[in-house]
Image: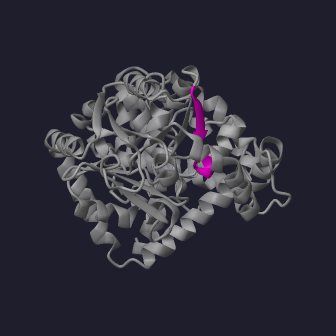
Amino acid sequence: MRQQSHLFKETAKQALADPTLKIALNRTTGLLQRRRAQVIDEFPEYAEARAAAEKIKTHTLEHMAHYLAQFEANAIAAGAQVHWARTPKEASEIVIRICREAGATSATRVKSMLGEEIGLPDALSEAGIERVETDLAEHIIQLAGDPPSHIVMPAMHKTHEQVAELFREKHAEPSEDDDVTSLVESARRELRQKFLGADVGISGANFLIAENGSIVTVTNEGNAELTVTPPKTHIVTAGIEKLVPSLAHATVFLRLLSRAAIGAEITQYTTFYNGPKRKDDADGPEQMHIVLVDNHRTEMLGSFLRPMLRCIRCGACMNHCPVYASVGGHAYGAVYPGPMGSVLTPAMRDLKSTKHLPNACTLNGRCKEVCPVNIPLTDMLRSLRARQHDAGLTPPVTKWALRGWGWLARRPKLYHRVTGLAVFVMRVWSMNKGRIRRFPMAGNWTRHRDLPQPELGTFMQQYKRRQGK
């Protein structure tokens, strides 16, 4: 995916003006929020599981070198070949070399954001290797020529009506009906023979288990198993932060991942792969290669961004983010959108070219509340903003506004009078209609949505009234 985060303001405006995108985002984010809330309510051990997950990840990151060495030794003992890549370019070159050594002309691929991060779709295309995306949503965006817009549901920006039209145009045997079941059947007919005819199967990994060298994939469609079992070569690409010490530790995350991601107790398919096919195995690949990717993760390990390496890529933060729900994933112009992407992208690129992303946040804190490993996303975004300011990347208008606010905030009596006057003016301006459609100097906000009518008084005025002061 081409990095375009520097265009965030322009792409966000385009997204806000797209009514179909709004329908698609509202349908899916609303559904995911309701489902998650329900399954968390029905999981009384959620708080304990969340605390345990945070503790396991924190421990693993503190002993990253030990567990990486343990994983490598056990994966090799199980028959896999382990490769190390410092950069996305190195990682994609390793994958292409393995494909060429296998004589591959086609490769099936399971959805993997790490694959997007290292630019694998483009690398396969440039190498003349046919890429077949086997996840339904990835199949949709491959046909449409779109990049993913969500890390779990990459076609979130599409309505099912748009998908039906796309399948009629692209599929050899499209369904006559536009219902979801018929669309799935159409994709199955299109992909089945490509599963069986691929030379190489490429997957990511949800977890890497150090104690036995296993990798774990979690899907709802069974496409991971069909992707990596028939070909003679299975290539795994994974970030080094996917490590967990043991199988018992992995089960803690399995209980949290699908609940946070899609609002389900568990996914349909959870598979543990431990090396290539053995002598007496009925099926499986003859070779298994695991490509472990750094891409600035070790730098994050030694910085204030270390907690970000706890991320298990569930997407819950973006499902609950008001900014993501308004503009969708493409506006971020990066592989990882939403709150987690606004932290990861500057870490993996640079602060200057991604300067809009840490500011694409209301700091409401919902992302941290729903994070299954309790990542302090808003704290890190605030720190990135401070670093932008220190690096001289803050626009002059913002600098003067911050100075003005700082001057006012140091004079509490004046501050309360000014904010009280502002609330009074906004209430009068709203004419008691409950909303404000236009307001001086707020055009960028009111162009696409209304401002709510303020409450009767500032927070402090209401507090004093309730205290009887």
Q: Position of residue 153 (x, y in %)?
A: 57, 51
Q: Is residue 168 depicted above or below 348 in this figure?
A: below
Q: Does the magenta stretch include residue 93?
A: no
Which residue is painted at 79% across and 45% down in the image? 172
Which picture quadrant has residue 346?
A: top left
Q: Where is residue 284 in the image (x, y as percent from the top left)?
A: 41, 50
Q: Is residue 94 depicted above or below 430 in this figure?
A: above
Query: Does residue 388 appear anywhere in the picture?
Result: yes
Which residue is painted at 49% across and 32% down in the image? 401
Q: Where is residue 110 in the image (x, y as percent from the top left)?
A: 51, 45
Q: Which sits in the foreground, 416 or 361? A: 361
Which picture quadrant has residue 406?
A: top left
The magenta segment is 129-138
Point out the image quarter for the N terminus.
top right
Which residue is painted at 31% across and 25% down in the image? 86
Q: Is residue 137 magenta?
A: yes
Q: Which sits in the foreground, 450 or 137? A: 137
Horizontal relation, residue 331 to residue 266: left or right: right
Q: How many marks?
A: 0
Horizontal relation, residue 244 to residue 136: left or right: left
Which picture quadrant has residue 423?
A: bottom right
Point out the image quarter for the C terminus.
bottom left
Which residue is painted at 45% across and 66% down in the image? 259
Q: Where is residue 163 in the image (x, y as percent from the top left)?
A: 75, 50
